[in-house]
Amino acid sequence: MKALRTYSTPEQAYIVRGMLADAGIAAQVQDTGTNSVFPSLGGGSGGATLLVDEKDAPRAKELIAAHGD
């Protein structure tokens, strides 16, 4: 898997993951710093990284760019 982009919130990454899934591109979201059990204690950035297979990365980047993200 290749890190495609980091978003400031996991929700943003999940929205883009859904858009990629609609185009037939599998993606995963990796949380980059929140404590899911006690979010208020997280101390992390709360961001999330979108991961895709290497072979799908060029097409995924095109789709994301076409949607203005």
Image: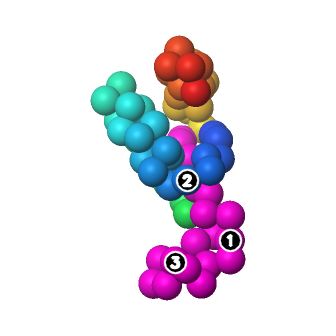
3 and 2 marks in contact (CB < 8 Å): no
- State the predominant SS element of the stretch in magenta: loop
Badge 3 element = helix
Query: How far apart are the two marked residues, 3 and 1, measured between alpha carbons?
Result: 9 Å
Examine the image and state in which quarter residue 26 appears: top left
Q: Amino acid at mark 3?
A: Pro
Residue at which label 3 appears: 39
Residue at 61%, 46% in the rendered image: 7
The correct choice, above or below, for 5 with respect to 59 in the image is: below
User: Residue 11: horizontal and vertical position, in percent?
Assistant: 45, 51
**Position in image of residue 29 (x %, y %):** 49, 54
Q: Which mark is residue 9?
A: 2
- For residue 23, side relative to residue 16 (left or right): left
Q: Mark 1 highlights which residue?
A: 44
Residue at image x 43%, y 47%?
Answer: 14
Can residue 30 be seen here?
A: yes
